[in-house]
Image: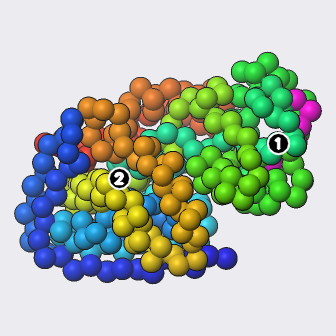
């Protein structure tokens, strides 16, 4: 369907790892001794959600930090967190719910930074379905990708709106969310991203109606996170911190000059529609950055606690939630020194 990213290998000459300028950050100065290889697995095909990563690579920020970064595309969305748990890659892009569930199953993974600070998951419908808000889902058919926490999102949203879940049909459409919506198989889909599929539908003139899950009753969470193997945190502290610092500078460059920085993404995946990717980057860009006063890739402890408690309440976790051990802010620019 889409080609895998072309791996770009960079040889390091020097390293000056400085965090994104602003409140809550200070410079991290690293003394390079040799090029350090970093294997990174994406959560899916290269797209605008990964624009900061490709901006850092194309702009030379990884190279300047003494890193030789190889970016891999996963064979399926479940692979990244399993690969990092097995030690086959240094880092993987995944999702906060997946990190909590992986730890619940005993996998040694830890989120070391939030790449997208807010939920992108949403309920998307077309005007003909006449769904203006969650209450209008009564009597409708909603397609999901068959993921258990998507079902829990839907139930939470319906109950919050005063709709009995039994009055709404949930249909597993797998990864064909947009086709199922466009062909009328379902009235709405839950699991599509408002920034990506929502923007794509808008550019196609379909006037999508979007309900963001965190605005309809689901506790907020980090949509995309950077995951490492728990056992490698001490061994690879310098390398991982250098990677996040370089990513922060690449993402800042993306903010300052989106058109120039996005060239790396389009080079990695030539099958992408440049107009769509630029539009998605524009609406997603604010979510790449933390709240004022916090370092790049900040993860809010109270937010992790609340979301883990929600997962436990909805029987998505078996053990008592230990959200504070599922993530760390110690590797962020200016943190943990």
Display colour scheme? rainbow
Q: Residue at x 40, y 72 (%)?
A: 264
Residue ID for mark 1: 127
Coordinates of residue 92 in the picture (x, y in percent): 43, 60
Horizontal side of 290 relative to 182 (left or right) equals left
Coordinates of residue 311 in the picture (x, y in percent): 59, 33
Cα gap from disc 2 to disc 1, whole angstroms = 33 Å
Q: Residue at x 18, y 76 (%)?
A: 12
Q: Which of marks 2 and 1 is nearer the N terminus?
A: 1
One can see residue 176 in this view = yes
Horizontal side of 216 relative to 319 (left or right) equals right
The front one of 166 and 279 is 279
The circle on residue 255 is 2
Horizontal side of 100 relative to 211 (left or right) equals left
Q: Could you tell me which quadrant the C terminus lies in?
A: top left
Q: Give the range drawn in magenta.
A: 138-144
Callout 1 secondary element: helix
């Amino acid at each position: 369907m889409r080609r895998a990213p072309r791996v770009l290998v960079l040889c390091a000459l020097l390293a000056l790892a400085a965090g994104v300028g602003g409140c809550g950050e200070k410079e991290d100065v690293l003394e390079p001794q040799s090029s350090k290889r970093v294997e990174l697995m994406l959560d899916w095909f290269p797209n605008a959600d990964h624009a900061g990563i490709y901006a850092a690579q194309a702009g030379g920020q990884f190279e300047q930090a003494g890193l030789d970064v190889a970016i891999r595309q996963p064979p399926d969305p479940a692979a990244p967190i399993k690969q990092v748990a097995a030690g086959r890659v240094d880092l993987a892009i995944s999702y906060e719910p997946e990190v909590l569930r992986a730890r619940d199953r005993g996998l040694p993974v830890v989120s070391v930074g939030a790449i997208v600070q807010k939920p992108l998951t949403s309920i998307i419908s077309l005007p003909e379905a006449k769904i203006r808000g969650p209450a209008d889902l009564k009597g409708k058919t909603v397609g999901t990708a068959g993921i258990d926490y998507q079902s829990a999102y839907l139930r939470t949203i319906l109950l919050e709106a005063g709709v009995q879940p039994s009055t709404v049909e949930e249909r597993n459409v797998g990864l064909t969310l947009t086709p199922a919506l466009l062909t009328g198989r379902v009235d709405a889909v839950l699991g599509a991203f408002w920034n990506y599929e929502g923007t794509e539908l808008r550019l196609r003139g379909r006037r999508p109606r979007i309900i963001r899950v965190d605005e309809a009753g689901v506790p907020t969470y980090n949509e995309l996170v950077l995951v490492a193997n728990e056992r490698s945190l001490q061994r690879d502290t310098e390398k991982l911190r250098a990677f996040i610092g370089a990513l922060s500078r690449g993402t800042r460059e993306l903010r300052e000059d989106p058109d120039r920085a996005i060239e790396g993404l389009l080079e990695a995946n030539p099958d992408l529609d440049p107009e769509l990717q630029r539009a998605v980057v524009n609406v997603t860009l604010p979510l790449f950055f933390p709240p004022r006063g916090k370092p790049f890739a900040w993860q809010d402890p109270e937010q992790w606690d609340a979301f883990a408690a929600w997962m436990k309440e909805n029987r998505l976790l078996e053990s008592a939630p230990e959200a504070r051990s599922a993530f760390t802010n110690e590797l962020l620019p200016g943190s943990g020194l």
